[in-house]
Image (tube, helix red, strand yellow):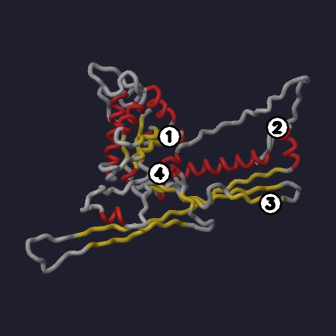
Amino acid sequence: MANYFMAQVKARPSFDEPEIIFTQAQASGAFEALENSKPRVKLSPGDLYVYVNAVDLRTETVSAQSLANKYPSATLSATYHGTQTYMIGARATYDHRDMEAASNYALALPAAQQYACQQGIFQQMRNGLLYGFNPANNEGLLNAQGAIVVSPPQDQFGNTTLQTYDSGDMALFFLNQVVNLRSGMFQSGGDINSRVVVISPQRVFLQLSDAAVVQLTSYQREGAGSMTTGGMIKDVMARDGSTFDWYFDDTLIGKGAGGTDAVILTIPEIKNPMLKGTVAQTNKFGSTMQPSMVAVNVMYADMVAPLEIPTPVPDGGITVIYELRVTAGWNLRPQGIYIIDMPY
């Protein structure tokens, strides 16, 4: 890692602005697709795999007016799932001369190198979350095994691309996917309020949240003339207490089938379906047994922030190594994630 701080030639008298123009990177919202919007910090630095147990239940009963001679029983089938961990690393190297040169630009070099290395590691985490480090192993949310892949059908005017699609039809398309998502996970009824999360490129997000105003027609449409597609979706879902949160990540551009933009629609964590006040609970096992994992998408890490290992170097400088062990993005419930191929 190099440090380039060229000599300055300035006219005097002059004024030096203390604020600095820093390069801005995209603040990815991809981690919002995880349970509680963050990785699970549970690993030890030497853990090479993560395993999760799963138990499936099938119960048979008999019903008759008289006592049966033989009763069937419940069948519990146990299995487990696993994924690899990966070490992400970066290095910062500088000496007192670099620090002196950086001070001419009013820059604190140790802090700048620290934040730069951390940013690189977090960006690599984002790549592992979405695409996996080894996609052939179904790593990454876009490679989730069993995930449902859909694309918008033609709207009522025959349009298929995002920029030409009817705004009201697009809102109904997303609402129908939310219905399919929630019903497939039994996330409806009672007091179950879902947190639905969408991760898409900015050009999809901004088009639907800011530009795609629901058109006026000969009949009254929800939000017609004043509300965008995104606003209509959020307003409709808010009526039952559910949320619809949109986040962006531009690396999803062109990652869908045939070069379309990939859009991730997911419920990051489930709520156990159990109706209050009901004695006969048909989900008694699933809603009562503990410890129960409610996560749909997870990513494990050994620390919240990368470990820093400073080491002096022979020529008088210092090297700081940054390390963080993580898994790739891991979908545990394929019925809880939809991949939408969005033609732009």
Q: Amino acid at mark 1?
A: Tyr
Please name which of the two marks, 3 or 2, marks the residue nearer to the observer. 2
Rendered residue at 83%/59% (across/down): 312
Please name which of the two marks, 1 or 4, marks the residue nearer to the observer. 1
Please tell me whether residue 317 is drawn above or below residue 343 in the rendered image.
Answer: below
State the separation of the CA atoms marked 1 and 3: 39 Å
State the separation of the CA atoms marked 2 and 4: 41 Å
Q: Amino acid at mark 2?
A: Ala
First of labels 3, 4 by sequence position: 4
Q: In this figure, which residue is indicated by the disc labeled 2?
A: 106
Q: In this figure, which residue is indicated by the disc labeled 4?
A: 141
State the separation of the CA atoms marked 3 and 4: 37 Å
State the separation of the CA atoms marked 1 and 4: 15 Å
Check disc 2 and report its element: helix, strand or loop: loop
Q: In this figure, which residue is indicated by the disc labeled 3?
A: 311
Q: Position of residue 288 (x, y in %)?
A: 35, 65
State the separation of the CA atoms marked 3 and 2: 25 Å
First of labels 1, 3 by sequence position: 1
Please name which of the two marks, 2 or 4, marks the residue nearer to the observer. 2
Q: Residues within 10 Å of mark 4 (few under 14, many from 20)?
A: many
Q: How many marks?
A: 4
Q: Amino acid at mark 4?
A: Leu
Please tell me whether residue 266 is drawn above or below residue 49 in the rendered image.
Answer: above
Please name which of the two marks, 1 or 3, marks the residue nearer to the observer. 1
